[in-house]
Image (cartoon, rainbow, N blue to C red):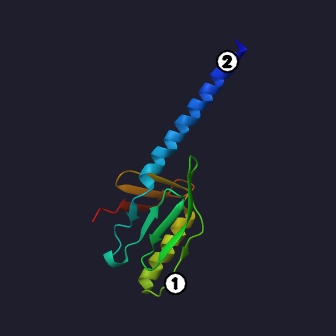
Amino acid sequence: MSLFLRSSGLGSLSAAVFLLAQSLAAVAAPVQGPEWVFANDPPEAQRSVQFSGGGRLIGFSGCNPFSGPYELTQDGLTIGEVVATRRDCSQEAMDRETELFRILNLVRSAEASQSELVLKAADGTPLANLARRSQR
C-alpha cells in the first residue's frame, strides 16, 4: 500500500510539472516571436521589441538598434541590461529611446494576446501597450 501511495504522489507531481510547463508555453508563445511596436510612434522612428525563443531581446529604439537578455518564467518577465548603438538622432527620437529603456528596466510581467502586448511593472501597473506588427 505504501508503495502505491508513493508512486501515486510522483504521478501527481509529474502531472503538476507538466501542467506548469504547458502554462508557461502558453504565456511564452504569444510573447515570443512576433515583433511588437509602439503603434503611436511616427513610422520612420517606430520603436519595436522582439523576444526570441532563446532568451534574447532585440529591437529598435526609434533611434538605435538594441539587444539584451530576458527571462520569461511563471513568476513574470525580467529584462537584463540592454545595449544599443550610439547613433545621433533628433532630440525627440532620443527622448523616446530614453523612455523605452526606462520602461524595459521596469518590466516585471507581460500580458499578451495575438494582437497586443502589455508590459507591466512589479505592482501590475501597465508601462506600455504594444501592437503586433502586421506582416508586410
Reading the image, the residue beneath label 2 is 5
Circle nearer the N terminus (1, 2): 2
Single out the mark in the foreground, 1 or 2. Answer: 2
Q: Residue furthest left?
A: 136
Quarter occupied by the N terminus: top right
Q: Observer-nearest residue: 112 or 7?
A: 7
Quarter occupied by the C terminus: bottom left
| Residue 105 image point, x, y percent | 57, 66
Q: Quadrant of residue 37?
A: bottom left
Disc assigned to residue 67: none
Reading the image, the residue beneath label 1 is 86
Placement of 123 over or under 64, stated as above or below: above
| Residue 43 image point, x, y percent | 32, 75
Judge left or right: residue 105 versus residue 36: right
Q: Residue at x 33, y 78 (%)?
A: 44
Contact between marks 1 and 2 (CB within 8 A): the answer is: no
- Total tally of numbered discs in the picture: 2
Judge the density around disc 2: few (<14), some (14-19), many (≥20) Cα neighbours within 10 Å: few
Indicate the amino acid at tag 1: Arg
